[in-house]
Image: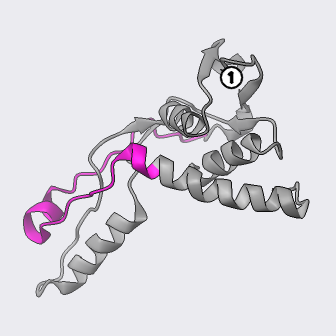
Amino acid sequence: MTRKITRAVARIEVGLESKLYLGNLDAKRDWGHARDYVEGMHRILQVDEPGDFVLATGETRSVREFVELAFAEVGRNVEWRGKGVEEVGVDKATGNTLVQIDPTYFRPTEVDLLIGDASKARAQLGWAPKTPFAQLVKEMIERDLVEAKQDAADGKHGV
């Protein structure tokens, strides 16, 4: 879902799309950077005794917060209006709808909260995530903006 959000934000910013369609904005996830997880996996491979380890940030952020930060990276402020499936995220400056709820994206077995406990990895491997959530979003938006600008220059409008 993270790439769906950042790609859509970048494509909206360059004029290739007009809206981002999502399901449950209030679902909370434990988002972390792949760079941190790869470092953790490397440390796991270095231990003498094999074991099960959880690599996670231990922090949760909602889909809504991810969306807000992603749009903020391109200078847009999202204001939420409405409730439930009628809720929309509107560009505060222009009034244009940027985010719309699409019920087809609701998961029948939605888990509202996903959070990991990496205490064993911290204690036994000395591992901890280094990339803050806001930095993760910033890096993703920066990369997807490069791609969206190239698509716009190449005349590619499909996702």
Which quadrant is the C terminus positioned in? bottom right
Amino acid on which the number 1 mark rests in the picture = Asp
**Residue on which the image places disc 1:** 91
| Magenta span | 108-136
Residue drawn 27% across the image and 71% down it: 40
Q: List x then y, in percent, for residue 17.
A: 81, 42
Given the current orientation, which residue lies at the most extreme left position? 123
Residue drawn 40% across the image and 59% down it: 33
Q: Is residue 42 above or below residue 3?
A: below
Image-based side of 149 in relation to 130, left or right: right
Q: List x then y, in percent, for residue 4.
A: 65, 50
Q: Quadrant of residue 43?
A: bottom left
Q: List x then y, in percent, for residue 131.
A: 33, 54
> Secondary structure of the magenta portion, mostly?
loop
- Residue in front for this viewpoint, 154 or 54: 154
Image-based side of 142 in relation to 127, left or right: right
Q: Is residue 24 above or below residue 109?
A: above
Q: List x then y, in percent, for residue 21.
A: 72, 37
For label 1, the crowd category at 10 Å Cα-Cα, with few meaning under 14, some 14 to 19 and many 20 or more, is: some
Image-based side of 151 in relation to 9, left or right: right
Residue drawn 70% across the image and 46% down it: 8
Say whether residue 59 is magenta. Answer: no
